[in-house]
Image: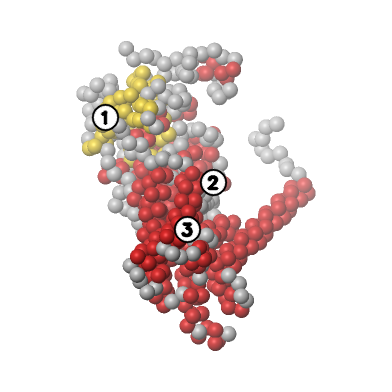
Amino acid sequence: MIDLLTDPLVQRMMIVAILVGATAPVVGTYLVQRRMSLLGDGIGHVALAGVAAGWLAGSWADLAQQDALAIPGAIVFAIVGAVVIERMRARGIAAADVIMAIMFYGGIATGVLLISAAGGSNANLMGYLFGSISTVSWTDVWVTVALSIAILVVGVGLRASLFAVTHDQEFAHSVGLPVGALNMVVAVLAAVTITASMRVVGVLLVSGVMILPVAVSQIVTRSFSRTMAVAMGVGVAICVAGVAITLFHDLQPGALIVVLGVVLYAVVASSAGLVRSRRRRRDHAVAEERPLEPTEGATA
Amino acid sequence: MTAADPFHHDTPPAITARAVRVRLGGHEILHGVDLDAFPGEAVAIMGGNGSGKSTLVRALVGALPVSAGSIEVFGRPRSRATASRIGYVPQRASAGGGVTATAREVVRSGLLGTGQLLLPRDAKARAMDALDHLGVAHLATRDVASLSGGEQQRVLIARALVRDPDVLILDEPMAGVDVPSQEALSAALTERRDAGASIILVLHELGPLAPLVHHAVVLDQGCVTHIGEPPRALGVHALPGHDHEHAHADVAEPEGSTFAWEVRP
C-alpha cells in the first residue's frame, strides 16, 4: 500500500482525481440549477471534434507526437462550442434540447471525419471518449492544477452572483447584474471543466462527474451553498475511490467512477425515501393514538 | 407638467415612461405606453389577461429591451446604474431552479447589483432583518420551494426590500397568497409608501390593496385606455366570494374585460 502511494504514477492519478472530483460538481451545481444538466455532454462532444482537429493539425504540421495538439484543440473547440450554445439559448434560436442534439451528433460526426482525414482510426479517439488517467503525465497534472484553480476561483468565488442569475434571471436583470456575461461565465466554466476532466473520465462520461455528485447532494441538503459543498465532497470521494479500486482490479477508471456515482445516488435516494416513509408512519401512528382535539375558534 | 400627470405633483416622478414600445417574438406587445410614478404614491397597472401589464413592468426593470420610447428613473435614462434604486418582485412562477435554495440565500441575492458581484459582509444580518420585517424570519433556513404561496411571496418581497429601494415594482403580488400573508404584505407596502417610496403594482383586481393605491393605469391590448381613479369592480365581479377564474361559463361580458373601465376622454 505504501509502495503504491509513493509510486509517481499513482500520485499523479490521485492528484488529478481529487482535482476533477472537487471542481466538476461546482459547475454541475449551476447546470442543474439552470436545468441544463446535458450541457456538459453537448460541450464534451464538441471537445471530441476539437481533439480530432488537433490531431489533424498535428499531422499537417508533421509533429513527432501526433496528438500533441489534441488537448489544446479540445479546449478551443469546447470554449467556442459553449459560447455558441449559450448564444443560441439566450437568443431563443432553438430549444435547449434541440441545441444539445445538434451538438451531440455534430461533435461526434465531425470528430470521426477529422480523425480519418488525419490518417488515424477511431481507436485513437477511444482514450478521449472514455478517459485514460493511467497515461497522465506531470504536464497533464500541472495543466489540471491551473484549470482547477481557475474553476474554483470563479465558480466558488462568484457563487452569489452566479446563483442569482441561474435562480431568477428576471430579478438579476432588475438589480443590474451583468446577466449575459454571467451566463457566459457558466458556459465557459463548463467548457474548461470538461477539458480538465477529459483525461479522467472521457468526454462521453464527463457529465456524470459534474451532475451525479449534485444529484446525490441534493437529496440531503436544503441550501444552494451546502449542495455545492457536499457535491464537491461526493465528487472527490467517487473519483478517488474509483481510481483506487482500479489499482487492484483491471477496470476502466472513468466508467467505474460514474458507476460508483450512480450506485451512491441509488443508495442515498432509497435510504432518504425509507427515512421519510418511516417518519410518516410514525407521525400517522401518533396522530391515531391522540385524535385531534377541536381547537378554540375552529369552525366545522 | 407632463401629459401623463393629471394630479399636478410638485416633486419630479420616480419613474417616467414615454411612448414605450416592446416587441416580443416579432409581435409588438406595447404600442407606445406612458406612465408616471411619484415618490410616496402607489400606482396600479391594471387590465385583462394579455393586456401587456407584465411586459410593461419587465421593460421598466430592464428585463425586456424597449424597441422605442424612453424610460427614466429619477430623471436619468434607465440603465444598470439606476438599478440600485429599484426593488422588483417578479411573478412567483418566474423564480426557482433545479437546486434547492433557502429563503435567506434568496433574500441575500437582493444585495447584489451593478458593480456588486460579491455579497457585502453584513449580508446575512441584512437578509435576516428583511425576513423579520415580513414576519418570516423563522423560515430563513427552509427550502423556498417547500414554502406556501404566501410565504414565498413574502420572501420575494424581502429580497426586494433588502435593497432599501426608492421604487418598488411588484407583479401580481397577491396571486395565490393566503389572508395572513396578504395582511403582512399590505402593511409592509403601506409603510414603504408612507416612508416616501414609489410603488408600482401589476394587479388583476385591487382586492385588499385598494386602500394603498392612489391611481391606476389601465392597459388594453398594449395601449393605455385609462389613467386616473382606480376602476371599481362592477356587477357580479364585485360580489364577495365571486370566482373570477370560473365565472365566464354563465356570465356574458365584454370581451377580455373583468371590469367596467372608465374610458379616458
Residue B145 image label: 2
> In the image, what residue type sits under mark 2?
Ala
Badge 2: chain ID: B
For label 2, the SS is helix
Looking at the figure, which quarter contains the N terminus of chain B?
top left
Return the residue nearer the eye: B238 or A183.
A183
Residue B87 makes an appearance in the image: no
Can you say whether B227 is above or below A84 in the image?
A: above
Alpha carbon distance from label 3 to label 2? 45 Å
Contact check, label 3 and label 1, Cβ < 8 Å: no
Type of the residue with mark 1: Gly
- The residue that appears at 37% across and 30% down in the rendered structure is B26
Q: Which residue is mark 3?
A: A112
Task: List the residue tagged with mark 1.
Answer: B69
Instruction: Report the Cα–Cα distance between label 1 and label 2.
Output: 38 Å
Name the residue located 55 percent from the left edge and 73 percent from the top edge: A243
Q: How far across and down, in percent of the image, does residue B36 sit?
A: 29, 28
